[in-house]
Image (cartoon, rainbow, N blue to C red):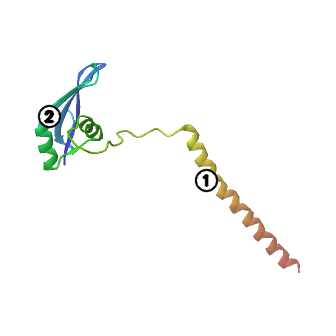
Protein backbone atom coordinates (compact mmCIF):
# COMPACT_ATOMS: atom_id res chain seq x y z
CA UNK A 1 0.00 0.00 0.00
CA UNK A 2 1.32 3.42 -0.91
CA UNK A 3 1.41 6.28 1.56
CA UNK A 4 2.05 9.99 1.24
CA UNK A 5 3.90 11.00 4.37
CA UNK A 6 6.48 13.37 5.82
CA UNK A 7 10.16 12.47 5.82
CA UNK A 8 12.23 14.49 8.28
CA UNK A 9 15.38 16.14 6.99
CA UNK A 10 17.42 19.08 8.23
CA UNK A 11 19.66 19.80 11.18
CA UNK A 12 19.16 19.07 14.85
CA UNK A 13 16.47 21.33 16.36
CA UNK A 14 15.75 22.74 12.86
CA UNK A 15 13.48 20.21 11.20
CA UNK A 16 12.31 20.44 7.63
CA UNK A 17 10.20 17.80 5.98
CA UNK A 18 9.79 16.29 2.53
CA UNK A 19 6.43 15.10 1.29
CA UNK A 20 7.19 11.69 -0.20
CA UNK A 21 5.35 8.72 -1.68
CA UNK A 22 6.63 5.39 -0.43
CA UNK A 23 5.45 1.92 0.40
CA UNK A 24 3.84 1.98 3.84
CA UNK A 25 5.60 -1.19 4.98
CA UNK A 26 9.08 -0.02 4.03
CA UNK A 27 11.44 2.18 6.02
CA UNK A 28 10.50 5.86 5.97
CA UNK A 29 14.11 6.89 5.41
CA UNK A 30 14.69 4.33 2.69
CA UNK A 31 14.13 4.86 -0.99
CA UNK A 32 10.94 6.73 -1.85
CA UNK A 33 9.03 6.58 -5.12
CA UNK A 34 8.73 10.34 -5.57
CA UNK A 35 9.29 13.61 -3.71
CA UNK A 36 6.12 15.70 -3.84
CA UNK A 37 7.12 18.82 -1.94
CA UNK A 38 8.72 20.43 1.10
CA UNK A 39 7.43 21.73 4.43
CA UNK A 40 9.39 24.01 6.78
CA UNK A 41 7.59 24.55 10.10
CA UNK A 42 10.45 26.55 11.65
CA UNK A 43 10.48 29.53 9.29
CA UNK A 44 8.08 32.38 9.93
CA UNK A 45 5.69 32.16 8.19
CA UNK A 46 5.76 28.38 7.70
CA UNK A 47 6.67 27.58 4.12
CA UNK A 48 5.05 24.86 2.06
CA UNK A 49 5.85 23.99 -1.53
CA UNK A 50 3.75 21.26 -3.10
CA UNK A 51 3.53 19.63 -6.52
CA UNK A 52 -0.27 19.62 -6.60
CA UNK A 53 -0.61 17.74 -9.91
CA UNK A 54 1.48 14.83 -8.69
CA UNK A 55 -0.23 14.74 -5.28
CA UNK A 56 -3.65 14.48 -6.93
CA UNK A 57 -2.27 11.81 -9.28
CA UNK A 58 -1.01 9.66 -6.40
CA UNK A 59 -4.25 10.10 -4.47
CA UNK A 60 -6.23 9.01 -7.55
CA UNK A 61 -4.01 5.95 -7.94
CA UNK A 62 -4.85 4.89 -4.37
CA UNK A 63 -2.10 6.29 -2.18
CA UNK A 64 -3.30 7.27 1.28
CA UNK A 65 -2.10 10.41 3.01
CA UNK A 66 -1.00 10.19 6.63
CA UNK A 67 -3.10 12.17 9.13
CA UNK A 68 -0.59 15.03 9.30
CA UNK A 69 -0.21 15.21 5.52
CA UNK A 70 -4.00 15.07 5.13
CA UNK A 71 -4.37 18.07 7.45
CA UNK A 72 -1.61 19.91 5.59
CA UNK A 73 -3.33 19.31 2.24
CA UNK A 74 -6.65 20.52 3.66
CA UNK A 75 -4.97 23.66 5.02
CA UNK A 76 -3.35 24.37 1.64
CA UNK A 77 -6.71 23.69 -0.09
CA UNK A 78 -5.34 20.90 -2.26
CA UNK A 79 -8.17 18.61 -1.16
CA UNK A 80 -11.57 19.46 0.28
CA UNK A 81 -12.25 17.45 3.42
CA UNK A 82 -12.41 17.87 7.16
CA UNK A 83 -9.24 17.73 9.19
CA UNK A 84 -8.58 14.53 11.11
CA UNK A 85 -7.06 14.10 14.54
CA UNK A 86 -3.38 13.39 13.95
CA UNK A 87 -2.43 12.46 17.51
CA UNK A 88 -3.95 10.61 20.43
CA UNK A 89 -4.49 12.68 23.57
CA UNK A 90 -2.92 11.31 26.74
CA UNK A 91 -5.45 10.15 29.33
CA UNK A 92 -5.87 12.43 32.33
CA UNK A 93 -4.50 11.13 35.60
CA UNK A 94 -7.82 11.73 37.38
CA UNK A 95 -9.81 9.91 34.69
CA UNK A 96 -8.08 6.56 35.17
CA UNK A 97 -8.65 6.59 38.95
CA UNK A 98 -12.40 7.02 38.51
CA UNK A 99 -12.41 3.95 36.25
CA UNK A 100 -10.88 1.88 39.03
CA UNK A 101 -13.53 2.98 41.50
CA UNK A 102 -16.24 1.84 39.09
CA UNK A 103 -14.64 -1.60 38.89
CA UNK A 104 -14.53 -1.92 42.70
CA UNK A 105 -18.25 -1.18 43.16
CA UNK A 106 -19.60 -4.34 41.44
CA UNK A 107 -17.41 -6.48 43.70
CA UNK A 108 -18.85 -4.74 46.76
CA UNK A 109 -22.38 -5.42 45.51
CA UNK A 110 -21.62 -9.10 44.95
CA UNK A 111 -20.47 -9.59 48.57
CA UNK A 112 -23.87 -8.73 50.20
CA UNK A 113 -25.62 -11.27 47.95
CA UNK A 114 -23.32 -13.99 49.27
CA UNK A 115 -24.05 -12.97 52.87
CA UNK A 116 -27.82 -13.25 52.37
CA UNK A 117 -27.44 -16.76 50.98
CA UNK A 118 -25.32 -17.97 53.91
CA UNK A 119 -27.89 -17.42 56.73
CA UNK A 120 -30.52 -19.46 54.85
CA UNK A 121 -28.30 -22.54 54.90
CA UNK A 122 -27.59 -22.14 58.61
CA UNK A 123 -31.29 -21.83 59.50
CA UNK A 124 -32.29 -25.08 57.78
CA UNK A 125 -30.03 -27.46 59.85
CA UNK A 126 -31.16 -25.88 63.12
CA UNK A 127 -34.85 -26.72 62.52
Instruction: Please give the label number shown on residue 103.
Output: 1
Q: Say which of marks 1 and 2 sits in front.
A: 2
Residue drawn at the location 63% of the way across and 49% of the way down: 101
Q: In this view, does 84 lie above or below 127?
A: above
At label 1, counting other C-alpha atoms closer than 10 Å, the crowd grade (few under 14, some 14-19, many 20 or more) is: few
Which callout, 1 or 2, points at the residue further toward the start of the chain?
2
Residue drawn at the location 73% of the way across and 66% of the way down: 114
Indicate the position of residue 62 as horizontal and vertical percent values: 16, 50
Q: Quarter of the image holding residue 57? A: top left
Q: Is residue 126 left or right of residue 96?
A: right
Which sits in the foreground, 124 or 80? 80
Check disc 2 and report the residue beneath it.
Answer: 36
Q: In this view, does 99 lie to the left or right of 80?
A: right
At label 2, counting other C-alpha atoms closer than 10 Å, the crowd grade (few under 14, some 14-19, many 20 or more) is: many
CA separation, marks 1 and 2?
51 Å
Indicate the position of residue 91 as horizontal and vertical percent values: 50, 40
Residue drawn at the location 31% of the way across and 44% of the way down: 82
What kind of element bears circle 1?
helix
Amino acid sequence: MLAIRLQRIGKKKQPTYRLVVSDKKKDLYGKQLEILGNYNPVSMPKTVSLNVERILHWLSVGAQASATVHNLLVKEKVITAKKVQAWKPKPAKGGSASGRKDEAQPKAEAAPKAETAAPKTEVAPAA
